Amino acid sequence: TVLSTREFKFYSYYHRIKETLRQYWKPNVERRLAMLWHRGARMKDAELVTQVLVLLDEKGTLTRITRVTSSGFSDLDEAAMEAFNQAAPFPNPPTGMIDKDGLVRIRWDFILKTEASPQISFRSGGAPPPSRRMP
């Protein structure tokens, strides 16, 4: 199995980001889903993915977040971007992650599985690992 070397090498930093994001994204997405359902939006059984590109400075301060791909629901995309804004900063990025221009670039996927009830999970950039259900 080929693993994303960058993701494996900086696992602890990605894990810190994930744990911080979790406390913001889950309530954000639940609130936005409730609003969507209240407005009559219906979702099929699917895996909805919002992919973002996050730029941090060398101190871990969020400088920019850009949506790369949409889940198909702008409210859910906004919940992902809002979570990064709320969770920032992400201090002490490893020096190996800092590009020559002084920025850290992280691609992050927010995944919402719609089944009988929504299930949410994360996956950071690189090769997508198997998704896990969040408690």
Image (cartoon, helix red, strand yellow):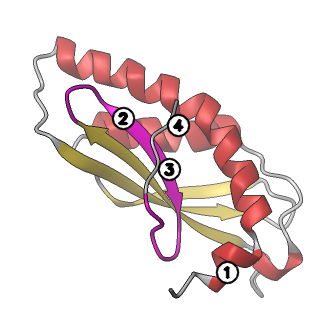
Looking at the picture, which amino acid does disc 3 mark?
Answer: Phe
**Foreground disc of the pair 4, 3:** 3
Q: Secondary structure at mark 4?
A: helix
Q: Could you say which quadrant of the image residue 32 lies in?
A: top left
Looking at the picture, which amino acid does disc 2 mark?
Answer: Gln
Residue at the (15%, 16%) spot, across then down: 39
The disc placed on residue 82 is: 4
Q: Is residue 94 left or right of residue 70?
A: right
Return the residue at label 2.
119
The x, y position of residue 17, in whole percent, is: 70, 50
In this picture, which residue range is highlighted in magenta?
115-130
Crowding at label 4, few (<14), some or many (≥20) Cα neighbours within 10 Å?
A: some
Q: Mark 3 and 2 residues: CB-CB less than 8 Å, in contact?
A: no
Q: Is residue 7 left or right of residue 115?
A: right
Return the residue at label 3.
122
Looking at the picture, which amino acid does disc 4 mark?
Answer: Glu
The x, y position of residue 56, in whole percent, is: 72, 62
Cα distance in 3D space between marks 4 and 3: 15 Å
Q: Is residue 47 left or right of residue 16?
A: left
The x, y position of residue 10, in whole percent, is: 76, 71
The disc placed on residue 6 is: 1
Q: Mark 4 and 3 residues: CB-CB less than 8 Å, in contact?
A: no
The x, y position of residue 12, in whole percent, is: 79, 61
Between discs 4 and 1, the one toward the N terminus? 1
Between discs 3 and 1, the one toward the N terminus? 1
Q: Is residue 58 left or right of residue 129?
A: right
Q: Main secondary structure of the magenta part?
A: loop
Cα distance in 3D space between marks 4 and 2: 19 Å
